[in-house]
Amino acid sequence: MTASTWDYEGYDPAEERLRESLCTLGNGYFATRGALPECAADDVHYPGTYAAGCYNRLASVIAGRRVENEDMVNLPNWLPLHFRRPGGAWLTPDTAPVLAHRQALNLDSGLLERLTRFGLDDGQVLSVRQQRLVHMTDPHLASLRTEFTVEGDHTELEVEAALDGGVTNSGVQRYSGLDGRHLTHVHTGTAVPGTVWLRCRTRTSDIRIGMAARLICGAPVTETHEHPRAVQRVRLVLEPGRTVTVDKTVALHTSRDPAISDPLQAAVDRVRAAPDFDGLLASHRIAWNQLWRRAELDVPGEAGAILRLHLFHVLQTLSPHTADLDVGVPARGLHGEAYRGHVFWDELFVLPYLNLHFPEVSRGLLHYRHRRLDRARAAARDMGRRGAQYPWQSGSDGREETQRLHLNPRSGRWLPDHTHLQHHVGSAIAYNVWQYCEASGDAEFLHTKGAEMVLQIARFWADSATWDENLGRHRIRGVVGPDEYHDAYPGAERPGLDDNAYTNVTAAWVLTRALEVLRDLPAPRRRELVERAELAHTELDRWEEVSRTLHVPFHDGVISQFEGYGDLAELDWDGYRERYDDIRRLDRLLEAEGDSVNRYKASKQADVLMLGYLFSPEELQSLFGRLDCRLDEETWARTVDYYLARTSHGSTLSGLVHGWILARARRSDAWSFCQEALRGDVADIQGGTTGEGIHLGAMAGTLDLVQRGLTGLETRGGALCLDPVPLPELSSYGFSLQYQGHWGVRLRLESGRLEITVPPSGGPSIDVRLPDRTVCVGPGKTSRLLLADGHA
């Protein structure tokens, strides 16, 4: 492992799913898992290809109930490339002796390389070297180069390449009881000698898919069509020490693509015009070089190597190609089928990083939310409320995609799923709108689509709040917070909790921001928006009132996660740690025992503490002050310690948030949580989940931990605000960012010094605000500042 290469030595079937996820290649339009091309989907391997936003809905009968699920579709497999000696068995690492095996993911060039040496039955050795790319310049192309070399005597080799339309969604064992047959009407054919095609469509969403493959080698290629596969075969003669090369280039289009008529014809035309492998690799390297320049990150040691891998996978899922697509942030990337490819609130952890490097991608992702605003308003109306209620899980059209049943693998029981009550997803969307506009200076978006979303989300919160005469406060009832373990009070017949602190405080923030947006809009635009939304002064007065009177519960001198949290039982944490090796998924352990986590003071992940992730200490104190609640440093410190002792960290986001919080609240303990966030996927600390797809929010969040968390970087008031907190374990690092039209602004912290460089341009100077002073850095200038006592 280096900062530029992620290596795996040796073949280990137990590790294959994890390696396949972490060796996925993509370009923001589609991605393919890092499975070996000669291996089919089975208990060890899972070759999957996924196009951003390509969903299909199917019904299944589970536990006697008919349920519908929408999935990101596993598209036809373009990888298959099998090889064998004539008349023998196909060679794979599972069926033939493996003398050596190495996979190397080259992060600089977006190239996956593989070298395997197979022992043949007569003492000969066959070396198979492959290079694979999913093209970052042309998002519809991918290519696989295979080089065969024999040691010993000469031999013949049969090679079979295919496009396989017989795939299903079967990459997650928990979903095995659900219908995963998403493709239908599979047809194959030959375009010209050496080029075959496959077309199909999704069963209910009726997305048409066209794929074409071109095979080039130094021998005649024959084509056959064995439903549902298009097959190309070639016989090679291998002389000892002489390498024979087979290049397979593939084009993919779907009917969701703009500027095409027929996806199949588009795929055939594209693969026909595609350069050879060397030409594709050259332009692919240029595209990756440009991405790395825009996302420059310089962190030393193992942490830096992992961060670069995280950045690589973020860029493969959400590249500049994504900006023109109608897609959101899939929580597990384009790397697998966990969460069915749905869009959650993970953009809350992703967009703050993208805002300062690829703002056009952030804007495109926010357009995805705006296009579904009408659906969110309909959801609110169905609840009897005004405004917009965005779904906890979203897919193709913005309806609620959260499953109503989920399987506990430990007990084997299907259980009700109430996570759709996480209405705080609306606040996350409003927060992302605000953060994007502050970082990019995109007033046009804020004044139009951004304002429309923020106002409708604020309207929902105001209409959700009910007045409690006894408390003299407004309350929001019947929700689920970020914790997710608690979805009901013990013994309650109905799900939902009252006054989740995170939900109420962020709702107050949204209402405050909405009023600010309205106030700052140009008068003609304000009039248009007020007319279209039918906003009356009385409604705005209510927003102001609710933003100041939402109830924030406390107990024992700390912020309560929700009203009544302090009345729950304490869990025997030591006892459970002794009984089980891993208690991250405490909810599953308790349910299997016939108990419920709803009874205990136990959280899956940061809930109340998420407030310290979103807001600086100064802003958080201001928010609580607006709500007429006192939040001093001592109360916050007690709250951090209280929940830290009662959290099982059953989410990869938990270590990230706690590391972020502790960097300022208790620096000595921060690094262990930062390390957990860094290792979340590479070490698969959630026990096998990474093989089902990487955790994109956690990966992007670690990048943002360096970019904003440790630097205290905020973009507000037209300035870059910085308040660094050095960690001894990460005392030297640097990165570049894009800020309000300035490309490549470089920040570096080292040995108690902060260096800021603004590249030459015709733009204005940048105001940099520190806790004790403001400096102005003009284009072509560098400012070097001395830090003292951990602060500038």
Image: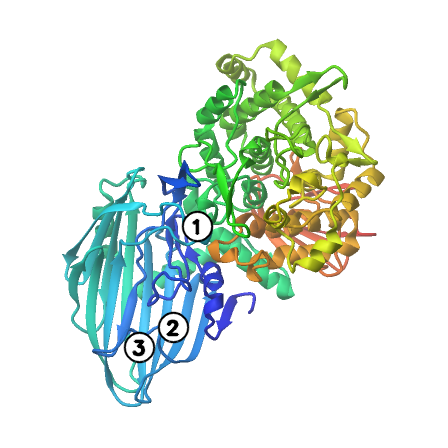
- Would you say 342 lies left or right of 569 here? left
Q: How far is disc 3 from disc 2 in space, using C-alphas?
A: 19 Å
**Which comes sooner in the sequence, label 3 or label 1?**
3
From the image, state whether disc 1 or disc 2 is nearer to you: 2
Residue 402 x/y as whole percent: 48, 37
Label 3 sits on residue? 148
Q: Tag 2: Cα neighbours inside 10 Å, few (<14), some, or many (≥20)?
A: few
Dividing the picture into quadrants, the one containing residue 610 is top right
**The N terminus - image quarter:** bottom right
Dividing the picture into quadrants, the one containing residue 230 is bottom left
Label 1 sits on residue? 337
Q: Nearer the viewer, residue 409 or 47?
A: 409
- Would you say 474 lies left or right of 174 here? right
**Which comes sooner in the sequence, label 1 or label 2?**
2
Q: How far is disc 3 from disc 1 in space, using C-alphas?
A: 33 Å
Secondary structure of residue under mark 2: loop
Secondary structure of residue under mark 3: strand
Residue 211 x/y as whole percent: 26, 52
**Amino acid type of the residue tagged 1 in the rendering:** Glu
Label 2 sits on residue? 94
Q: Which residue occupies 78% across, 27% down?
A: 625
**Residues tagged 1 and 2 counted as in contact (Cβ below 8 A):** no
- Would you say 240 lies left or right of 787 here? left
Q: Is residue 160 above or below residue 488?
A: below
Secondary structure of residue under mark 1: loop
Residue 303 x/y as whole percent: 63, 62
Residue 130 x/y as whole percent: 36, 70
**Disc on res. 62:** none
**Amino acid type of the residue tagged 2 in the rendering:** Asp
**Which comes sooner in the sequence, label 3 or label 2?**
2
Task: Decide if residue 275 is in sight here.
Answer: no
Q: Is residue 561 above or below residue 353?
A: above
